[in-house]
Image (cartoon, rainbow, N blue to C red):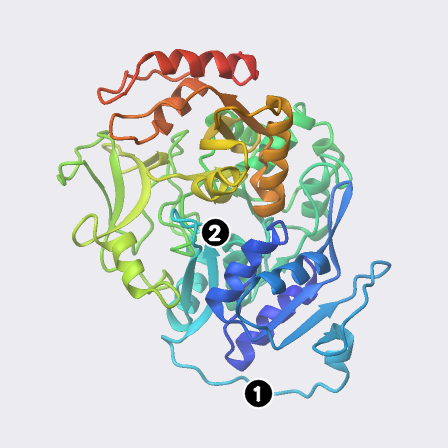
Amino acid sequence: MIPEAVIGMLACGRIGAIHSVVFGGFASNELASRIDDSKAKVLLTASCGFEPGRTVQYKPLVDEALKLASHKIEKIILYQIPNNEVKLNPANEISWDESLSNAKNVDCVEMNSNEFAYILYTSGTTGIPKGIVRDIGGHIAALKWTMKNIYNIDKDDVWWSASDIGWIVGHSYIVYAPLFKGCTTVLFEGKPVGTPDAGAFWKIISDYKVKSLFTAPTAFRAIKKEDPEGKFFSKYDLGSFESLFLAGERADPDTIKWAESLLNVPVIDHWWQTETSWAISSNCTGIEMMKTKYGSACKAVPGYNVKVIKPDQSIAKPNEMGDIVVKLPLPPGTFPTLWNADERYKKTYMTNYDGYYQTYDAGHIDEDGYIWIMSRTDDIINVAGHRLSTGAIEEVLSEHQSVAECAVIGIADKLKGQLPIGLIALKAGVQKDNETISKECIQMVRDKVGPVAAFKTAIVVKRLPKTRSGKILRGTVRKIADKEDYKMPATIDDPAILDEIKQDLIKSNILK
């Protein structure tokens, strides 16, 4: 999260090149898969990135990714972070400073409105990342419109999106939308707590006279945990501050109410996706403020015709649960296809319900038109606003020589929204002790998926609960772990397995 990263994105836009930003928390094989899919020509990186308490060395990760990738990158440009310089290979690597030393100004390249601005990869349920693409014209029109109409931001205002440019929020609301609008955008490298304390957000808002902040509910849960009484908050003058927007995962009512009482400004939970690049539902503060309903992401934003469809393909009545869908066509700024995967785009998103985009979120719409997002309908879990595929983590666990089969589920977590836990059944005759196997599995996920997965629990179980046709009952296990009511699935192979799993969860302190 340094200016050079944003400059790199904007430089691509200026010359009509497509960029694809990859978050620094991903492991080498994840970067390699994105290099292979995008067929990238140049890789721009830095010598390292900083996390609270540690430095992430990027060069070894990049070197390993280049070894794993089949596609060959032509050139690497590396920004040397002061006091963390690394040795470059003169054959195809140059420093950022060197690349600028003989650079010339060039005019903007004219592009057609339907050409692509960028690719942003999101987790695919098959483990193969999906390259969401954004077309230029619709992107500009939609994002510029949202700055005033959703967020009530004008040209001379200071806007802060406390996200990361590796994710969609960073693309849309750190880099592009504020610049399309002409307002000031804040680029922040740090965390809501620990850099240096739980007052970091309040200091930035106070120092730069920020009008509105957009961040993930996780950030506020972290601040609330560290400073429940708001002692740090009272040190700063937030006279310029008018509204807080939350998105990335469902904002729990407790966190919203805590933020409201502390900040004394509207706190708005709104809902959108990497695929859409801007809000599907929100309280549109620049049009008219609507009443808050805690737990709801408010009403559909102009441009989206949102419906709830039941498994029998009928439209749900108010307050009936079902799959949340958007009637086609989608508005400007959303994704026109997937990178080099038109058929996958249609099959994944546009065929389950004829004439509708499937969001893969489930919930209901109430009698007032308020949208309630309750859960995901596929196996993507949401860890601190980062969407991760449980299938990708399972793939890693199943590579362990002692593991016969495994299941990964996302369990509710007060801080991060969801955390993945692994259930692993061992091969017969394994001599190694369970604790060692668990530790090795956790390390494998860290190495291959990256710290972003926050994977810290692998429980050895005797067997996994399955249907008679062999499907693992992940949803039922998640409900047990989250202490939710569940029905014994009619298709379960052996009902006794669920009691065994419950005991394993108790032993592992997941169930208390």
Confirm whether residue 2 shows in the render: yes
Image location of residue 448, percent across then percent down: 58, 47
The dot on residue 35 is: none
Nearer the observer, 274 or 481: 481
Q: Secondary structure at mark 2?
A: loop
Q: Secondary structure at mark 1?
A: loop
Name which quarter of the figure residue 282 lies in.
Answer: top left
Does residue 259 appear to the left or right of 303 in the view shown? right
Between the residue at mark 2 and the residue at mark 1, the CA separation in whole angstroms equals: 32 Å
Give the labeled residue for mark 1. 107
Q: Residue at x 39, y 76 (%)?
A: 115
Does residue 406 appear to the left or right of 212 in the view shown? left
Give the residue type that dot 1 points to. Asp
Q: Residue at x 40, y 23 (%)?
A: 477
The dot on residue 151 is: 2
CB of mark 2 within 8 Å of CB of mark 1? no
Nearer the observer, 96 or 469: 469
Considering the image in quadrants, where does the N terminus appear?
bottom right
